[in-house]
Image: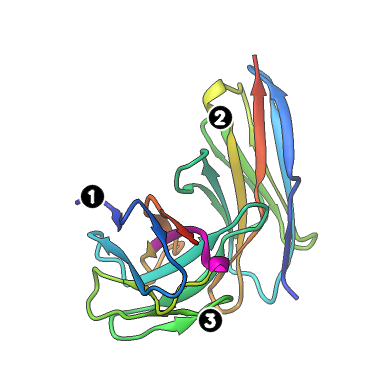
């Protein structure tokens, strides 16, 4: 079967760095996405990786290793507004997104 | 309209009733999707449409139907609602003509079936 694993919850301190991991087993691979979802709101697109390596976008970076079925989202200089759930999703061989259950990130002052 | 809109925002429905959730996008995206999101679970695909006039079944299609008469609209119908269909429903769209096929989401409909 297809499976996306990510931690259920993480806690970090304002101003610090946090890394959210995602491992996947899917039928085929056509890219990995990270989304941010604030409570009661819709998911919003953060990043996309299809090749191995690091993609940097401001305070957020996303890394992919296809051989290991692994990705992480790195958030730097954490702000209180970064408190949200972070969703990892993989596009499979049918070009459908398979979603993880999300990681709830709690930022403490 | 900017992006994707969904209606209603929330709804309480008696079991056995018929309900249509509306979704409209103005980005001229060819593909559209319906997901449900339940606590502790990832987003699950109900139905999708790669282009106007075509639809396909996702992971959890039972009890739901869709139509795609034009590019902009993608309504989701629950023919006879059951309590297990209580969930938050998100509509999304993407441009499948090239690029990353990134999906963009509407604000969601919170549905409670009693």
The relative height of residue A7 versus residue A30 in the rendered view (above or below) is: above
Are marks 1 and 3 in one subunit?
yes
Q: Residues within 10 Å of mark 2 (few under 14, many from 20)?
A: some
Does the segment drawn in magenta span residue B88? Answer: yes
Q: Position of residue B35 (x, y in %)?
A: 49, 65
- Would you name the residue on which mark 1 appears? B2
- Side (left or right) of A34 relative to B11: right
- What secondary structure is marked by label 3? loop
N-terminal label among 1 and 3: 1
Whether the residues at callouts 2 and 3 have beta carbons within 8 Å, the answer is: no
Of residues A72 and B20, which is closer to you in this image?
B20
How far apart marks 1 and 3 lie (CA) works out to 31 Å
- Would you name the residue on which mark 2 appears? A82
Q: Which residues are magenta?
A: B83-92
Magenta region's main secondary structure? strand
Task: Give the residue displayed 61% in from the left and 72% down from the top.
Answer: A92
Count of picture labels: 3
- What secondary structure is marked by label 1? loop
Task: Give the residue displayed 45% in from the left and 43% down from the top.
Answer: A41
């Amino acid at each position: 079967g297809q499976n996306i694993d990510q931690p259920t919850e993480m806690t970090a301190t304002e101003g610090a760095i946090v890394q959210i991991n995602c491992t996947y087993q899917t039928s085929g691979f056509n890219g990995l996405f990270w989304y941010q979802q604030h409570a009661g709101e819709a998911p919003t697109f953060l990043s996309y990786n299809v090749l191995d390596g690091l993609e940097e976008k401001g305070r957020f970076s996303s890394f992919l290793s296809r051989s290991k079925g692994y990705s992480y989202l790195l958030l730097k200089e954490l702000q209180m507004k970064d408190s949200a759930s972070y969703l990892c999703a993989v596009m499979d061989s049918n070009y459908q997104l398979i979603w993880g259950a999300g990681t709830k990130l709690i930022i403490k002052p | 309209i900017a992006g994707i809109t969904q209606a209603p925002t929330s709804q309480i429905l008696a079991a056995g009733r018929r309900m249509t959730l509306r979704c409209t996008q103005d980005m001229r995206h060819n593909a559209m999707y319906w997901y449900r999101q339940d606590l502790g679970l990832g987003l699950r695909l109900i139905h999708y449409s790669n282009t106007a006039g075509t639809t396909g079944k996702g992971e959890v299609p039972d009890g739901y139907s869709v139509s795609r008469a034009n590019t902009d609209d993608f309504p989701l119908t629950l023919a006879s609602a059951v309590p297990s269909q209580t969930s938050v429903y998100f509509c999304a769209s993407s441009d499948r003509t090239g690029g990353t096929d990134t999906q963009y989401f509407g604000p969601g409909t919170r549905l409670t079936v009693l």
